[in-house]
Every structure is written in C-alpha cells, then in structure tokens.
C-alpha cells in the first residue's frame, strides 16, 4: 500500500533521513500521532491516476532500520452483526482456507510470499516464509453510528479508523484476542460497510484496504482494515473469481496487506525512495493469469493475487 504518514512525520523524515514522502501525500493526520495510517491499497482508478510514473518509479526497496516479522501469525476478525460474513458463511470459509493455505505452504518457494525472503532486519536476519493462521473471531457487536461520511452511494455505515481500532481494543479487553506483536489482525466487515481514515480518503473511492498498528496493553500489533471488496466492483475487481466467491476479490487485497505487514509492519522498515512498500509497487499487476482466473496455487488451491516487488529482479514477481 502507499504509505500514508502525517505531514509532521513527512517533514521529519525529509530533514532527518532524506526520505521522500509517498505520492500522493497524506491529506492530513487523520488519526493522530502514534496511530498514523501506514498505507492503502489504492482503488483501480486511484492506482491508474498516480502521477510521475507511480509506485514503480521509486526504484528498489531500501531498509530504514525498523521492525520486520521474521515469522508471522494471522487472525481473521469478521465484524458482522448479522453474521452475513460470519461463522458458516462461504465468504469467511474461503478467507480462512486462504490463511490456512498460506500457513501450510510455509517454506515453499513457489508462491508470492516467498519473495519476502530477500528482506531482513537490523541484525541481517532474513524474513522466513513461516506463517501461522491462529484462527478466526466472529464478532457480532453492532456497528456504531457512522463515524465518518463518504460519497459512496452503496455504503450504509461509515466506520472511522478510530472506530475500527476501538473494536480491536474491545475484543482484546474481552479476551477474544491476545496481544501478540508478531500477529496481524485482519478486520473484515460486511458488504456495503464503508470506512474513512480522513475526510477525503475513504473505501471504494480512494482505497480497497489498508494496514496500520494499534496498542493492545503494552504491545503494539498490526491490523488491517479489509472492507468487502465486491461492494463496489469497479473499485477493487482483480478481474476474475477463481473460487466463484466474492471473497476472491477481498483475498487479493488481503494478500497485499499481509505481505506489507511482514516487511514493513510499523512503516519504518522496507519501502522505496518515494515511500511505496513492496506490494504498492505491484498493485493490480497479476502477471500471467490462467484460464481458470487464477495465477497462484497455494497448498493445492487456486487464487488470484497481485505480484510482489522483488529487489533481486527489480520487478514484480509471483514466486521466490
């Protein structure tokens, strides 16, 4: 995703480290110091309108000294008051299968997650393709009154980033989730539920998903906002449904967020000179897609996933 930082943080980076902000720059500091949105998966239209060569113009990723996840865990949170995408739904079942497949294929060089093996931390320890799916949480808490306002006619409720973080913190307080610093918590919401992290940055008009981090107790953990991608097909459509399920579209942007939460979880590890993370640089780039609409086989199952930036080849790749 395009890294989104506050204007203050951008100025600090330029002065102290000479790192340019991503394009387009953050419109404002939407969520306050310590909770900046790290980035977004742009909609198709937003990605195609990027000026100056877009994400690919930033060159290879460079390391900025921050945390990476040498191994990682995932938790899927289905926030669905009516259980429309909750326990027993085909949507949740397919996403759970995907996370399980990514975990089962750990160590493989044959899928897009293996591209991350070339990146490392401050002790030169390289990221291992070692993922664990620790389960799903089915959250029936009612949505709060809209905490934001978007211009998308299909949405019925608009959740602010503060409301999403508050719900993750509520689940932690109730014991539904733990606070593991190597875990990324993916929050999936119902069809036609919108979200915004600022007054001008909203789901389906500017983005399809984003990742950031949140404090749970004394730990900082990664989370991703995962709207129902098929709510506005023109915005987040990868072009096929290899499993004949709306979850196919959400899984594509989930994979983008998952990989970025591994090699840039706090926004201070791997990104290019323009501020783009590895998945940003290959957003909506799928390489060769087979006749079944898939471009990846993971643990024997077929998926459509965007590529990942490889410093080794200075280009987008689907395998290690």
Image (cartoon, grey):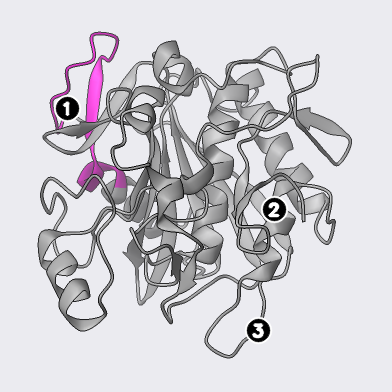
Q: Tag 3 or tag 2, which sits nearer the N-term?
A: 2
Q: Residue furthest right?
A: 300
Q: Quadrant of residue 12?
A: bottom left
Q: Is residue 10 left or right of residue 274?
A: left
Q: Is residue 242 left or right of residue 187?
A: right
Q: Where is mark 3, residue-wise? A: 125
Q: Is residue 192 above or below residue 120?
A: above
Residue 291, x across and y down, in percent: 80, 14
How would you rate the neighbour count of disc 1 (Cα within 10 Å): few for under 14, some for 14-19, many for 20 or more? some
Nearer to us: label 3 or label 1: 3
Residue at (49, 65) in percent of width and height: 61
Q: Is residue 263 above or below residue 210?
A: below
The answer to which of 137 and 42 lies nearer the viewer is: 42
Q: Is residue 20 left or right of residue 249?
A: left
Q: CA distance from mark 2 to mark 3?
A: 17 Å
How would you rate the neighbour count of disc 3 (Cα within 10 Å): few for under 14, some for 14-19, many for 20 or more? few
Residue 2, x across and y down, in percent: 36, 48
Q: Tag 1 or tag 2, which sits nearer the N-term?
A: 2
| SS label for mark 3 | loop
Which mark is on residue 113?
2
Magenta residues (range): 145-164
Nearer to us: label 2 or label 1: 2
| SS label for mark 2 | helix
């Amino acid at each position: 995703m395009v890294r989104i930082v506050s204007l203050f943080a951008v100025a600090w980076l330029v002065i102290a480290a000479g790192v340019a902000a991503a394009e387009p720059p953050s419109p404002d500091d939407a969520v306050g110091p310590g909770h900046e949105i790290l980035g977004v998966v742009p909609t198709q239209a937003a990605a195609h309108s990027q000026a100056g060569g877009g994400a690919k113009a930033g060159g290879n990723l460079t390391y900025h000294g921050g945390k990476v996840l040498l191994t990682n865990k995932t938790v899927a949170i289905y926030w669905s008051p009516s259980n429309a995408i909750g326990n027993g739904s085909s949507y949740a079942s397919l996403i759970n299968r995907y996370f399980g497949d990514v975990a089962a294929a750990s160590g493989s060089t044959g899928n897009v997650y293996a591209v991350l093996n070339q990146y490392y931390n401050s002790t030169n320890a390289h990221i291992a393709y070692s993922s664990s799916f620790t389960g799903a949480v089915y959250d029936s808490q009612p949505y709060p009154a809209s905490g934001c306002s978007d211009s998308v006619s299909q949405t019925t409720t608009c959740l602010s980033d503060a409301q999403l973080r508050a719900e993750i913190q509520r689940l932690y307080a109730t014991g539904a989730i733990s606070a593991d610093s190597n875990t990324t918590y993916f929050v999936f919401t119902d069809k036609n539920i919108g979200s915004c992290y600022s007054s001008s940055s909203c789901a389906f008009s500017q983005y399809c998903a984003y990742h950031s981090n949140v404090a749970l107790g004394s730990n900082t953990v990664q989370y991703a906002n995962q709207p129902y991608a098929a709510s506005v097909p023109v915005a987040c459509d990868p072009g096929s449904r290899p499993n004949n399920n709306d979850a196919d579209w959400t899984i594509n942007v989930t994979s983008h967020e998952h990989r970025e939460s591994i090699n840039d979880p706090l926004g201070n590890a791997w990104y290019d000179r323009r501020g783009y993370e590895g998945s940003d640089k290959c957003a909506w780039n799928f390489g060769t897609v087979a006749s079944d609409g898939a471009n990846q086989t993971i643990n024997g199952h077929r998926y459509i996933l965007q590529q990942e930036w490889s410093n080794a080849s200075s280009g987008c790749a689907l395998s290690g």
